[in-house]
Image (cartoon, coloured by chain):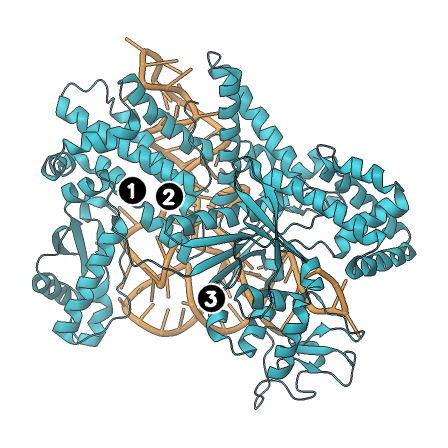
RNA sequence: GCGCCCUUAGCUCAGUUGGAUAGAGCGUCUGGCUACGAACCAGAAGGUCGGCAGUUCGAAUCUGUCAGGGCGCACCA
């Protein structure tokens, strides 16, 4: 409702300015006054117009307020301060609509959206950094779906790169085993942990003796080639680790629709199709001199063209430093080239498609498909979407932008505009956390605010380990507080709390903030945390349980007995501002969801969830509802609790967090 | 060297498109459980928003510059 009324007011103001002053404003700035006593919306509009109209702001504001007349949903517009226009809503009406769960929709979008996230190398266990990626991505998917969009979730699998090759080398050179033995190993519960260690060992082996790296190159070529022992081993390992990743993420309620793999991008020759287009359009050209002689290159994103150059197609136009090699002099294509081809496929511009095979059936029956050279005849359709979001850490910004520039260079302007690099910062560890994990730090490292994780060194917090300790920690609390519940009930609650804590922790920081991970912070269930919000919901639930009511139907049934006028009487009283602010916050779900999508910033949603819970906790403490003597007031307070509870559950659901029955 | 990001309370972070008195959590100190369960609430202390200059009626927010920190600039992915 909050966002809806904002749009109503903005549209009306814009219309008035057009008719009265002949002004066409692109955007009308609306904000919330510092205190709710001043109104629900504030317009600093008159300050902006003062210069254009050559009149003092205060006078303009008064003119607007007088001229605009009544606005539906609002009780009054008034001038305040040096020229603010403050708008007060009709509290009763707005609360009534909120209680009845009325959600005015804006126009429905039809185009499909593709969100790609996770994309973990399938050579070792997932760690905290991967969790941030997956939780950001999954939450963004939920945000889009909540606002009515159709979304495909993809997880790109680089199963032919050096990282997988290194584990293959480990099995071939360091811990030789038969294929049957390795196959048996892949069936172990946490095969990805085994690979984690092995990968670190191989990396150390290279460091000790750099000449060992020659094996890596040989294995890498064999894997890319396909149809040999190395390739078969890589397939076996990467598929097993991939399954483990799906299981780990499933613990957090994160699921995928499609897993495109690099092996198919190679085998199905996506690059050949892309290469033709890139050559024809002049995005790529063959360098004939210098260090990149014999390579097909394009301009690196972010490098400026010298004056007088157009597309950069002619020889020698791009200086060596500004060149990005797409095809090596030996004729093989690099990562960026494959990525360009893959993105042409995403937008349906490549003219080729994957084969599709059903790969994984989740316990909840959701199906996850994987790319295949020859797929099944019947399969869902992926790709050819309108908008894409790639959840990839900020270190790959330049590579992402180079792909984007290639699309632009090919003339796909609209697609380029719908290409979003959902960029976020990494998760590092605090020095204290690193020491807890048993790592020797130098004095210099101890003084730093964070230490970067390193898969190569086997240095990091594994995702499953973190989840395990969160669940164990939550279980201790639940067990001591609820000995009367069955072990399975307690287990479920502990799991919900653990996931709530973890997901909230990863979402409360803005994307541009580097998270310095520490067990103490992540294991906290107090203050600005997921469990704090969950606890507010449980408190609301308890009111209804003690009162013998069903909280889920209370909002709709009880609000039916309360007219807008009756609600207004409760909410417009001098002393009602605190409760009204709670209602106002509860009416903002759709508004905050939209804002989080537009800014690609799920942290807004997390902050909002916390603030709403905070207001509710204050309300809970101040108004003992069940002890209220006045029946109609008690009814009103119950509706308040029911509405806030409903919105809290809704907001948490968008964050992928469940509300426990008890805590 | 070039590009991108960051610098706000003791610590960790919010602060929408510039707007009314810069907020929260943690930590510290003080209070509150006969329960709609305190995983909570109330209160206190704590800030020249890295420095300087500029634009503006108005700057934590925009521009320039300096300082400090991070990341990226492979015929790796």
What residue did someone put label 1 on?
Answer: A585
Give residue A516's position: percent from left, percent from top. Answer: 59, 44
Of the two numbered discs 2 and 1 on the same chain, state the one appearing first in sequence. Answer: 1
**In this view of the protein, can residue A440 be seen by the observer?**
no
What residue did someone put label 3 on?
Answer: A418
Residue A542 image-quadrant placement: top left
Give residue A326's position: percent from left, percent from top. Answer: 70, 73
**In this view of the protein, can residue A588 be seen by the observer?**
yes
Residue at x 24% of width, y 68% of height: A48
Which numbered dot is residue A608? 2
Alpha carbons under labels 2 and 3: distance apart: 27 Å
* Circles 2 and 1 in contact, beta carbons < 8 Å: yes
Of the two numbered discs 2 and 3 on the same chain, state the one appearing first in sequence. Answer: 3
Q: Chain of mark 3?
A: A
A484 relative to A251 in the view: left or right: left
A67 relative to A391 in the view: left or right: left
Output the letter for the chain in cyan. A
Give residue A120's position: percent from left, percent from top. Answer: 65, 49
* Circles 2 and 3 in contact, beta carbons < 8 Å: no
User: Judging from the image, what secondary structure is the residue with disc 2 in?
Assistant: helix
Q: Who is closer to the viewer here, B23 or A26?
A: A26
A547 relative to A118 in the view: left or right: left
């Amino acid at each position: 409702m909050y966002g809806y009324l904002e749009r109503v007011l903005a549209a009306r103001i814009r219309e008035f300015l057009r008719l009265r002053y002949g002004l066409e404003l692109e955007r009308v700035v609306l904000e919330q006054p510092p205190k709710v006593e001043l109104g629900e919306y504030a317009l600093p509009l008159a300050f902006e117009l003062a210069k254009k109209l050559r009149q003092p702001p205060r006078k303009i504001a008064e003119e607007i307020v007088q001229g605009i007349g009544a606005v539906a949903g609002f009780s009054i517009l008034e001038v305040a301060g040096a020229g603010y226009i403050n708008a007060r809503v009709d509290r009763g009406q707005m609360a009534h609509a909120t209680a009845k769960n009325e959600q005015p929709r804006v126009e429905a979008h039809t185009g499909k959206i593709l969100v790609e996230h996770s994309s973990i190398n399938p050579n070792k266990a997932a760690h905290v950094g991967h969790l941030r990626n997956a939780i950001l991505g999954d939450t963004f998917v939920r945000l889009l779906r909540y606002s009515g969009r159709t979304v495909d979730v993809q997880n790109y699998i680089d199963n032919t790169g050096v990282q997988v090759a290194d584990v293959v080398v480990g099995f071939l050179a360091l811990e030789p085993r038969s294929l049957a033995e390795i196959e048996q190993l892949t069936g172990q519960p946490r095969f990805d942990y085994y690979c984690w260690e092995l990968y670190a060992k191989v990396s150390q082996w290279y460091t000790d003796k750099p000449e060992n790296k020659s094996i890596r190159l040989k294995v890498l070529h064999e894997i890319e080639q396909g149809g040999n022992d190395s390739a078969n081993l890589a397939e076996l390992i990467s598929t097993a680790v991939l399954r483990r990743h799906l299981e780990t993420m499933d613990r957090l309620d994160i699921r995928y629709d499609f897993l495109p793999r690099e092996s198919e991008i190679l085998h199905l020759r996506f690059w050949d199709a892309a290469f033709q287009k890139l050559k024809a359009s002049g995005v790529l050209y063959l360098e004939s001199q210098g260090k990149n002689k014999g390579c097909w290159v394009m301009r690196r994103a972010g490098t400026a063209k010298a004056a007088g150059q157009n597309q950069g197609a002619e020889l020698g136009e791009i200086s060596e430093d500004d060149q990005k090699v797409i095809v090596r002099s030996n004729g093989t294509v690099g990562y960026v080239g494959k990525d360009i081809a893959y993105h042409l496929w995403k937008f349906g511009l490549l003219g080729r498609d994957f084969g599709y095979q059903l790969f994984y059936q989740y316990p909840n029956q959701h199906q996850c498909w994987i790319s295949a050279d020859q797929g099944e005849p019947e399969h869902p359709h992926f790709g050819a979407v309108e908008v894409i979001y790639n959840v990839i850490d900020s270190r790959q910004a330049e590579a992402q932008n180079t792909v984007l520039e290639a699309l632009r260079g090919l003339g796909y302007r609209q697609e380029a505009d719908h290409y979003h690099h959902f960029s976020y910062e990494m998760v590092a560890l605090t020095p204290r956390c690193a020491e807890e994990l048993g790592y020797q730090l130098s004095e210099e490292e101890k003084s730093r605010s964070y230490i970067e994780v390193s898969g190569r060194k086997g240095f990091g917090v594994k995702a499953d380990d973190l989840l395990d300790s969160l669940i164990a920690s939550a279980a201790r609390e639940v067990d001591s507080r609820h000995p009367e519940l069955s072990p399975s009930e307690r287990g479920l609650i502990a799991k919900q709390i653990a996931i709530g804590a973890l997901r909230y922790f990863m979402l409360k920081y803005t994307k541009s903030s580097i998270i310095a991970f520490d067990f103490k912070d992540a294991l906290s269930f107090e203050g600005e945390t997921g469990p704090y919000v969950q606890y507010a919901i449980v408190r609301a639930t308890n009111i209804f349980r003690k009162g013998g009511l069903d909280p889920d139907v209370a909002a709709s049934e009880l609000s039916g007995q309360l007219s807008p006028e009756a609600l207004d009487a409760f909410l417009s009283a001098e002393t009602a501002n605190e409760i009204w602010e709670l209602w106002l916050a509860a009416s903002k779900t759709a508004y905050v969801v939209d804002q989080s999508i537009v800014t690609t910033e799920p942290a807004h949603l997390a902050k909002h969830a916390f603030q709403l819970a905070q207001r509710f906790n204050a309300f809970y403490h101040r108004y003992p509802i069940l002890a209220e003597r006045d029946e109609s007031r008690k009814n009103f307070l119950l509706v308040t609790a029911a509405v806030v509870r409903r919105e809290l559950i809704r907001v948490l659901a968008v964050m992928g967090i469940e509300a426990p029955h008890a805590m």
